Amino acid sequence: MFKRFRFLGAGLLALSLLAPGAHVFAQQDGMQGVQADAAATDWRRLLKVTSIERMVRELPTYFRQGLDQARAQGAAVPPEVEAALKAAADEVFGFEGLQQAVTAHLQASLSAEQLADWLGFYATPLGRKLTAADEHAASPAFQREMMERAPQIMETLSQDASRMALLQSWLQATDAVEQATNMALQSQLALEWGLISTLPQGTARPSFDEVQSHMNAQRFAMRAQMAQMLLVHSAAAYQEFDTEELGQLLKRANSPAGRALYIEFGTRFYQTLAALSEAVGEAAGRRLGQRPV
């Protein structure tokens, strides 16, 4: 019944969530309203400079790519099912709703002082360089080139033990491997459950918990794969950073502000991923006049 579809690009971090429908920014009068608007602007600035906004906007695209790859790998997906799944992904991953939830996660993870600290960092030459590198690394052209050159990238990196250690320490400090593993597994879960939820009525099918348990059984192998992929990704994405700059990034990642953004924020995301995955199947089934069993 289960079939794994591997569709996430190398270096994709775990940035996914389910909007609970709560409004983050309340309208206020007078000076309080002005202050609230200013604070809202600062949180949204952080979404942009950290590339979180870009990745959230692309979540429906990631799901669609996964569906396309599932079909390429032999999955039988009738046109009406494909249309329902893609519409469900647009519904669940819609940016306007997710923006509010993302901001709520940030506000719950970072203090006002830590927000100001991060915005100050991203205004520095190193911060702007990091933003530019992350944006470039997200392009399809970079991803293709990185996958093609992965052996050469690793061979070059292996000749510089200190640089490799810095990158590995940075990945550990940002919890990047665990976050990417969570994202990969939960994204696969969303696709798998979406396909199961659109099976004809009366077809024997597992429960969501059973599918989730099967996916979690793949965690160890997936984590090992992600560790290798992200090391290659970081080596290629940050090749223009010298060891001093990498050391500064590592120090920042290990700071209280760094742990708040990378660890606490990421943990809150993971707590919503299963609900997000289940919601895709429910939305797709509903569009076909069915309900998951």
Image (cartoon, rainbow, N blue to C red):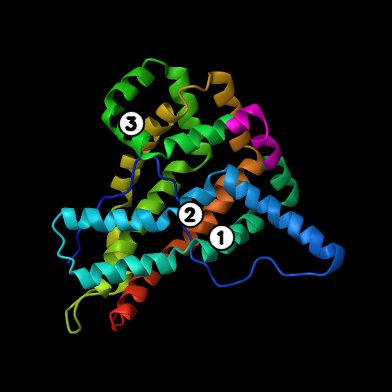
Depth check: give the residue in front, 24 or 86.
86
Q: Amino acid at mark 1?
A: Gln
List the single residue furthest toward the top. 159
Which mark identifies residue 146? 3
Task: Give the CA separation, mark 2 to mark 3.
Answer: 22 Å
Residue 12 lies in the magenta-colored region: no
State the SS at label 3. Answer: helix
> Residue 36 placed where, x, y %?
76, 61
Q: Earlier in the sequence, mark 2 or mark 3?
A: 2
Closer to the chain start, of discs 2 and 1, is 2
Query: What is the chief secondary structure element of the magenta stretch?
Result: helix
**Disc 2 + disc 1, Cβ < 8 Å:** yes
Give, as a single range, the part of the protein colored magenta. 119-128
Q: Residues within 10 Å of mark 1 (few under 14, many from 20)?
A: many
Q: Secondary structure at mark 1?
A: helix
* In this view, 182 is above or below 117: below
Q: Residues within 10 Å of mark 2 (few under 14, many from 20)?
A: many
Residue at the image point whose x is 48% and y is 38% from the top: 135
Residue position marked by numbered label 2 in the rendering: 56
Q: Secondary structure at mark 2?
A: helix
Q: Nearer the viewer, residue 25 or 164?
A: 25
Estimate the spatial distance between the alpha carbons at disc 3 and disc 1, rounded to whole Å.
Answer: 30 Å
